[in-house]
Image (cartoon, helix red, strand yellow):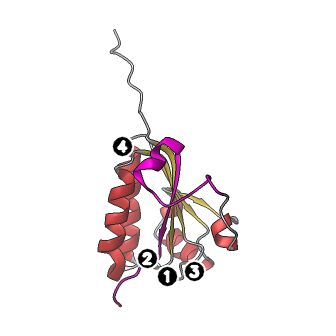
Amino acid sequence: MTGPLTTTSYALPLVEVCITRFDLACLPETGVVFDRLLALRPAQVVVDLADCRYIDAAAIGLLLDVHRRLACADGVLVVRNPNHRIQRILHHARLDQVLSIAVGASPASRGAQVPEGELRPVEPALVALGRARVEHAGQCRP
């Protein structure tokens, strides 16, 4: 005998976060951003690192925590466009075996304007659109 089928209900199919600084100094602020976007129950979170030059162990820990939280809700975390240095760090930490890592151009990494209505800053009204974009530049103290 099987129990009732349960399905995961997502508020947003995709949330994209562009991070330019990802280290211990920014971790509290970045953690708050991830907490807020995970509260939106996204099916997929894309962390775009195209403009990020460095990642440290604290940031890797945060990525793993976000991955775990998403996996518990049947969501997916994708790390997109890490530079060669960050790719090497992720490889040595064996995160490339745990996380989905995508290398390729995106509108944000090419500096192109995102089409109106496609991806925007997260606001409650955008939940109905089904897509959101979070710009997080890591404005924090050194």
Q: Is residue 121 magenta?
A: yes
Q: Position of residue 137 (x, y in %)?
A: 47, 76
Q: Is residue 15 left or right of residue 142?
A: right
Between disc 3 and disc 1, the foreground one is 1
Residue wearing tag 3: 85
> Between residues 102 and 112, which one lies in front from this camera angle?
112
> Which of 91 and 40 lies nearest the eye of the viewer?
40
Side of 95 where 5 appears, left or right: left
Q: In the image, is 48 to the left or to the right of 137?
A: right
Q: Are marks 3 and 1 in contact (CB under 8 Å)?
A: yes
**Is label 4 in a helix, a strand or a loop?**
helix
Q: Label 2 sits on what residue type?
A: Phe
Instruction: Please give the label number shown on residue 72.
Output: 4
Q: Which mark is residue 54?
A: 1
- Amino acid type at circle 1 is Tyr
Residue found at x 34% / y 50%: 39
Q: Is residue 65 visible?
A: no
Looking at the figure, which quarter contains the N terminus? top left
Element class at badge 3: helix
Mark 3: few/some/many CA within 10 Å (<14, 14-19, 20+): few
Marks 4 and 2: in contact by CB < 8 Å?
no
User: Can residue 107 be seen in this snapshot?
Assistant: yes
User: What amino acid is found at the position of numbered circle 3 in the picture?
Assistant: Arg
Looking at the image, tell me whether mark 2 or mark 4 is earlier in sequence order: 2
Q: Tell me the quarter of the image containing the C terminus.
A: bottom left
Q: Which mark is residue 87?
A: none
Query: Which callout, 1 or 2, points at the residue further toward the start of the chain?
Result: 2
Residues drawn in magenta: 116-142
- Name the residue that disc number 2 marks: 22
